[in-house]
Image: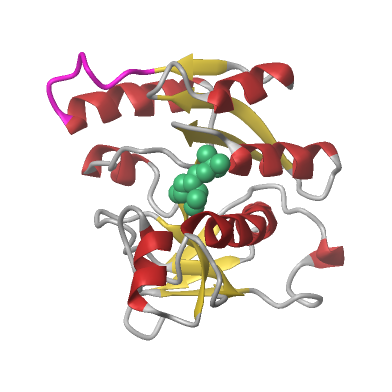
Amino acid sequence: MVRLGVLVSGHGTNLQSIIDAIESRRISAEIRVVVSNNPGAYALERARRHGIPVEVVEGGSYASREEYDRVLVELLRRYGVELVVLAGFMRILSRVMISAFPMRIMNIHPALLPSFPGLDVQKKALEYGVKFSGCTVHFVDEGVDTGPIIIQAVVPVRDDDTVESLRQRILKEEHRIYPQAIQLFAEGRLVVKGRRVFVKGDAGDVACGGVLENPSVTVFDGEDG
Ligand code: GRF
């Protein structure tokens, strides 16, 4: 069982997919708190409906990104959060957050990284003319959409796609792979070696495919660790 803090800013369909995965026992996790920088985020309504505590930390009153993140770290620690899940959180995290939760912050991005980092990426993918796009779950480092990749899903781009139709097709895959990545973390199966994230073997390495007591990610620092 891994204790999650989910950070949101908007509609919260990814949050919903995680809630649904937990409630149907497809993943072994508990959402301790949902935090938004936007008090009007519909995601907060979703959390409330499921009895999940919500907190709003608006950006305006903090002098710097670091100062904001210190409040965030304190809040997440107070709720006993082990894994921070960014689900449409529209702020860039500073070193303060990254170093407080090293390889314990995940993000989902609606493109196949390293193609199309940043914003409005479904539009950029269409305009570029790629035949496939998709989504990426990755650990968060100090760059924007640059951290080690955990899972990707590929989605075809159709000739008659609009930004919205492509967005919807990608979202469907987001809702599938984000809970999956969280479950791999909960089972302690993610091994990070440099930029690469390996998933420890299905049967042998994890007793009964069960959930380990101390959810964690193994990080090798050395070159050939
Ligand atoms: C998703 O497309 C996600 O990939 C991106 O922000 C969007 C959030 O959507 N990071 P929602 O709020 O989960 O519906």
Name the chief secondary structure element in magenta: loop
Q: Where is residue 41 in the image (x, y as percent from the top left)?
A: 49, 24
- The answer to whether residue 60 is magenta is yes
Q: Where is residue 110 in the image (x, y as percent from the top left)?
A: 47, 59
Q: Is residue 164 above or below residue 31?
A: below
Residue 141 in view in this figure: yes
Name the colouring of the figure.
Answer: secondary structure
- At x 34%, y 67%, the residue is 116
Quarter of image, res 200: bottom right
- At x 36%, y 18%, the residue is 57
Q: Is residue 99 above or below residue 219?
A: above
Residue 105 in view in this figure: no
Q: Which of 132 and 3 is in front in this view?
A: 132
- At x 39%, y 79%, the residue is 129
- The answer to whether residue 46 is magenta is no
Picture quarter with the N terminus? top right
Q: Which stretch did the figure color magenta?
A: 57-64
- At x 58%, y 59%, the residue is 165
Q: Where is residue 68 in the image (x, y as percent from the top left)?
A: 25, 25
Q: Which residue lies furthest to the left in this view?
A: 63
Give the number of marks: 0
Q: Which residue lies furthest to the front in this view?
A: 160
Picture quarter with the C terminus? bottom left
Left or right for 17, reference 12: right
Left or right for 151, reference 88: right
Q: Position of residue 5 (x, y in %)?
A: 53, 33
Quarter of image, res 94: top left
